[in-house]
Image (tube, rainbow, N blue to C red):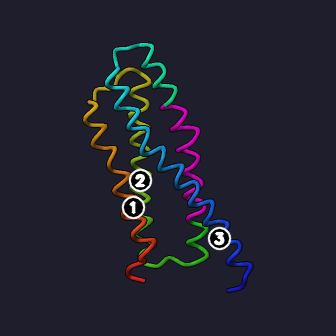
Amino acid sequence: MGLEFYSSYNWIKTFHIIFMVAWMAGLLYVPRLFVYHKENYDNFELSKVFKVMEKRLYFYIATPSLFIVWLTGLLMANLIGFDSWLIIKIGFVILLSLYHIYIGFHLHRFKNNQQDRTAKFFRLINEIPFVLLLLIVILVVFKPFY
C-alpha cells in the first residue's frame, strides 16, 4: 500500500477518533444530566435548564458524532477489510447506537414531563457506554482473532 493510502487512512482515523470521543462524552454525560434532572424534577426552573442542556448535548453533539463515527468507521473498514475483531467491534458499536436511541427515548420523556425512572436507574445505565468502550478499545488495541 502506498503513502497516499496511509495518508488518507490516517485522516479518516483521526476524524473517527475525534468524533468517537465527542459521541462518548454525550453518551456518558446525558444520563448523568438525567440523574440531576430527576433529583430536581419538581423544580420547574431548574428542570427547564436541564432540558436545554440535555437537548443540546444529545442533538447537537452526540447525534452528529454518532453518524460521523459510523461513516468514518465504515470507510476505514472498507479500506482495511472486515477481520473478525472488527466484526465484533461493530457489534459493540451497534449496541452503543441502540443505547444512544434509548437515551433519546428518555430525553423525550423528560421533555414531556413523563419520566418515571429514578435517579438510581440513570446512575446504573450510565455505566453501559463505559463498559462497551472498554471492550471496543481492547479489541482495537489487541486485535484478537486477527
| The C terminus - image quarter | bottom left
- Give yes or no for contact between labels 2 and 3 (Cβ–Cβ under 8 Å): no
Which residue is depicted at the point 33% across and 56% down?
131
Q: Residue furthest bottom?
A: 1
Q: Is residue 8 above or below residue 111?
A: below
| The N terminus - image quarter | bottom right
Which residue is depicted at the point 48% across and 21% down?
49
Which residue is depicted at the point 36% across and 28% down?
36
Which residue is depicted at the point 39% across and 61% down?
92
- Give yes or no for contact between labels 2 and 1 (Cβ–Cβ under 8 Å): yes
Please name whichever residue, 61 or 87, is drawn nearer the observer in this view of the structure: 61
Q: Is residue 120 above or below residue 20?
A: above
Disc 3 or 1, which lies upstream in sequence?
3
Task: State the separation of the CA atoms marked 3 and 1.
Answer: 23 Å
Task: State the separation of the CA atoms marked 2 and 3.
Answer: 24 Å
- Secondary structure type for disc 2: helix
| Amino acid type at mark 3 | Asn
Name the residue that disc number 3 marks. Answer: 10
- Give yes or no for contact between labels 3 and 1 (Cβ–Cβ under 8 Å): no
By secondary structure, the bulk of the magenta-drawn segment is best described as helix
- Secondary structure type for disc 3: helix
Q: Is residue 135 above or below residue 125?
A: below
Is 63 included in the stretch rendered in magenta? yes
**Segment tinted magenta in the rendering:** 54-73
Is 27 included in the stretch rendered in magenta? no
Mark 2 vs mark 3, foreground winner is: 3
Residue 109, given in percent of the width and then of the height, sits at: 39, 28
Give the side of residue 26 with respect to residue 67, left or right: left
Name the residue that disc number 1 marks. Answer: 92
Residue 108, given in percent of the width and then of the height, sits at: 43, 30
Name the residue that disc number 2 marks. Answer: 96
